[in-house]
Amino acid sequence: RATAMAPTEEELLSDDIASTHTWLTTTLFCVSLFESIFRPDPTSVICLFGFYSAGHRSAPAMRSFATFLTLTVVVDVLWFLNFMPFAAPSFAGFLEISRSEQVALILSLVSVLYKLIILPVSVRLYRAFNSEQALDEDAGQGGNGDLLSPGGLADKDGVPPGTRAAMG
């Protein structure tokens, strides 16, 4: 990535995508916090991967975030299939369930909707970060997702050089 020079057009585009990704992930994080009052939901923890990967421009962390978020969509679908207290989804059936079940169902639907919006953005951001990382490696600056390489996560997180040998 160009540090001394002006940012490239790709970097500016990935910055815009990262900003959008962060706002969407923040909204999903908030929804999942309230959702966890009504049913167990690991989404808020998984959102931390999204925050980290966007903030550190890490393609491997973004890939992990997208993978784990996809798994939560599968879990949500299984929860919907298991939870449905009425045979056919209808408004009348929805009114028959308790208020807390209604809130859990609505928050779960909103959560799945946000996840389905965030996933394509995450894949696009992963590709942008991956190509930036490849350009950095070609320029000899090291990748941003490799833990022990020069310019890797150990350097960015302030890990002292003496401890890097103990990590590897």
Image (tube, rainbow, N blue to C red):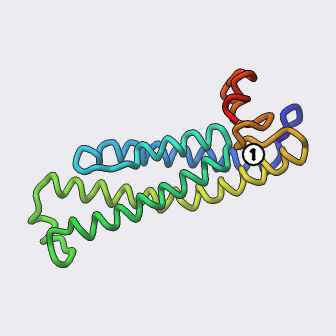
Q: Residue at x 53, y 58 (%)?
A: 67
* Residue 167, image x, y percentages: 67, 32
Q: Nearer the viewer, residue 65 or 20?
A: 65
Residue 50 appears left or right of 142: left
Q: Quadrant of the C terminus?
A: top right
- Which residue in the structure is indicated by mark 1? 12
The residue under label 1 is which amino acid type?
A: Leu
Q: Nearer the viewer, residue 146 or 77?
A: 146
Circle 1 residues within 10 Å: few <14, some 14–19, many ≥20: few
Dividing the picture into quadrants, the one containing residue 56 is: top right
* Residue 149, image x, y percentages: 78, 38
All told, the count of numbered labels is: 1
Q: Residue at x 53, y 59 (%)?
A: 119
Residue 6 appears left or right of 154: right
Q: Residue at x 89, y 41 (%)?
A: 140
Residue 149 appears left or right of 24: right
Look at the numbered disc 1 and give the secondary structure of its residue: helix
Dividing the picture into quadrants, the one containing residue 87 is: bottom left
